[in-house]
Image (cartoon, rainbow, N blue to C red):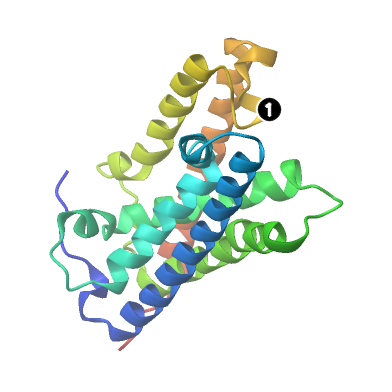
Amino acid sequence: MNTPMTLSQTNKTVQIVGKIAAIFGLLALALQFYINVTNSFNAGKGILDAIERFISFFTITTNIYATLTFAAHGWANSNNKLLRFFRHPANLTSAAACIMVVWSIFHFVLRNPAGLQGLNYWADLALHYINPFLTVVFWWLVLPRGNSGVNRNSWGYLLWYPLYYLIYVFVRGAIVNSYPYFFINVNNLGYPLAFLNAGGITLLLISIILLFALINRFAGRSPVKA
């Protein structure tokens, strides 16, 4: 896939917002990682267990994805190949759609009505609510009308991350006999129903991507001026 330079390279406003959002995203991820490490050690397990569990959750990997897109636009003059890849408009649209899936599933399916306390509360708030809001606002700020990156040639950018995540989580589950979410837990549901649920979530993601593309196309706005 080619990775052309994109809109935010000469936009100082976008670069400043991107840097702030990237730093916030990194701090939120660091807080959750600290919580995971603490829990692992309290359970008599080590750092490797904390890392393995940390990267098994779609919430975490999606927040990493969003933070990388923030950084790619925040440091838009960098020629780093990784940042150039994440600067592609389709990656920002995909990250925004993925993190809306994170928010919607957490808020409507997984959220504990009793709530969390202390550091867990702040990590939960940052990763499930603030970062999704920031990502959608950033998507709106960066991409001008008609350049959401959604077209017939861009689905490799749009779906590479969620598809790799699904492959990873099912391979990991087969190895360690553990799944991060009940609706893809093969041990309880079996592969057919777990795959069906994963397919349903993928269709939800594609629907959100297409919705964002329509909003971007018909909103009738201009890109932000520096």
- Tell me where residue 168 appears, x and y as whole percent: 42, 27
Is residue 43 shown to the viewer in this render?
yes
Is residue 147 toward the left or the right of residue 20 in the image?
Answer: left
Give the residue drawn at x 63%, y 59%. 123
Nearest the viewer among 194 and 226 is 194
SS at circle 1 = helix
Nearest the viewer among 203 and 43 is 43
Give the residue drawn at x 48%, y 70%. 24
- Tell me where residue 3 appears, x and y as whole percent: 17, 53
Amino acid type of the residue tagged 1 in the rendering: Phe
Give the residue drawn at x 40%, y 52%. 65
- Tell me where residue 218 appears, x and y as whole percent: 45, 65
Q: Where the N terminus falls, by quadrant?
A: top left
Is residue 223 shown to the viewer in this render?
no
92 shown above or below 98? below
The quarter of the picture where residue 154 lies is top left
Is residue 101 toward the left or the right of residue 218 in the image?
Answer: right
